[in-house]
Amino acid sequence: MGEKVRLALVGCGFMGQAVHLPNFLKAKGCEVVAVCELRERLGKAVAERYRIPRYYKSHRDLVDASDVDAAAVITADDLHAPVTMDLLSSGKHVFVEKPMATNADDAQAMVQASEAVGKLLMVAYMKRYDEGVLKAKEILDNLVSTGELGEVTFVRVHDFGGDWICGYDEPLVTTEEPYPEIRPRPPRWLPEKEAKRFYYFNNVFCHDVNLLRFLLGDPKEVKFATFRNEHHVSVLGYSDFDVSFETGSISARFWDEEIKIYFKHGWLEIKLPPPLLRNVPASVEIYRAGKIQRIDIPYVGWSWAFRNEAQHFVDCILEGREPRSSGRDSLKDVVI
């Protein structure tokens, strides 16, 4: 491979235009050489606006494109698996939006396709690339290894969302073309009446499952889970502590997502920013109990997780290293 990764964007919808395309255009060592979009007028208009040389209607047209090294798959969830597997099989590295897939069988097949051809598969869990999250992970690992605050006793994961767009108002290319019909790929065991809630949970809260695993490793079991309307509560069991996992939705002008890790003598709290609030990382707070109680707020530099994520994918290709959110690791989220 040359000095640059030649990348194609597959999917020119909101996230493709508002987030992923601009960040790959800015990524060092990356050249966006093509866009692919089933809605022809939309795809051609996006290519023209960003001066991208080629447009393809179907991702299958990319299969034989020898001058494309990698693809960013930003499509509807049900298309993630088939599109990704086709592109991997043609020898291209793939960056795919979360959720990785809509069922565990597809996710496993994606990993196998990646490993069979020796190409990278990275899932777009941008929270793993948030500078605040990385600082929290560094602090957490130190607290656990030193035992400074005692052992971890309980963890609370809370995500009720809110205003994730944060007034985003840059004009996007739109057309009146209807969205193509897509065949659903739900888990075989899923009752049809639960499909809507499952797809919502899988699309939105896979982030929190993945982030929990990034910070603390894999849970041993799911002890309890229940849905009521749009809200969900579960308890995940680790070897020495449990995790309460609370998700739902709220109509608010703020963002309500945090992870709080309790120790015997204090806690570590991570508050996540709204996804489209640029250059604002997660905030981190450490409480230390004792005769002199302390709350420490470490400094975290300004950066946008989405931009860091795009650069990481490009760097991993150029340097031949495994992504932080690899397909093999992300498969575990789909299974959970």
Image (spheres, rainbow, N blue to C red):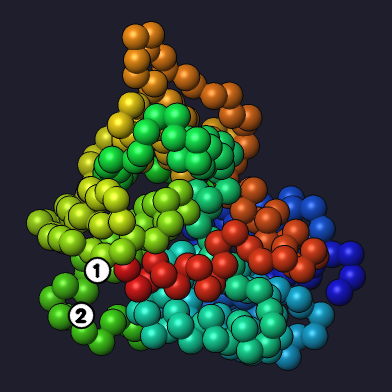
Q: Residue 335 versus residue 220: which sits nearer the camera?
A: 220
Regarding residue 63, the answer to whether it shows in the image is no
Instruction: Answer left or right for 96 relative to 197.
Output: right
Q: Residue at x 80, y 65 (%)?
A: 318
Q: Which residue ends up furthest to the top in the rendered image?
A: 292
Q: Residue 235 versus residue 162: which sits nearer the camera?
A: 235
x and y percentages locating residue 16 in the rendered image: 56, 61
In the rendered view, would you say 276 is above or below 110? above
In contact (CB < 8 Å): disc 1 and disc 2? yes
In the rendered view, would you say 226 is above or below 277? below
Q: Residue at x 58, y 24 (%)?
A: 299
Q: Which residue is mark 1?
A: 198
- Specify the amino acid type for callout 2: Leu
Which of disc 2 and disc 1 is earlier in sequence?
2
Q: Residue at x 25, y 87 (%)?
A: 188
x and y percentages locating residue 177 in the rendered image: 46, 72
x and y percentages locating residue 22 in the rendered image: 66, 52
Q: Which residue is mark 2?
A: 190
Quadrant the C terminus occupies: bottom left
SS assignment at label 1: helix
Q: Residue 230 versus residue 50: which sits nearer the camera?
A: 230
Q: Which quarter of the figure has residue 317?
A: bottom right
Q: Which quarter of the figure has residue 25?
A: bottom right
Q: Residue 135 versus residue 171: which sits nearer the camera?
A: 135
Report the Cα–Cα distance between label 1 and label 2. Answer: 8 Å
Instruction: Answer left or right for 8 relative to 31.
Output: left
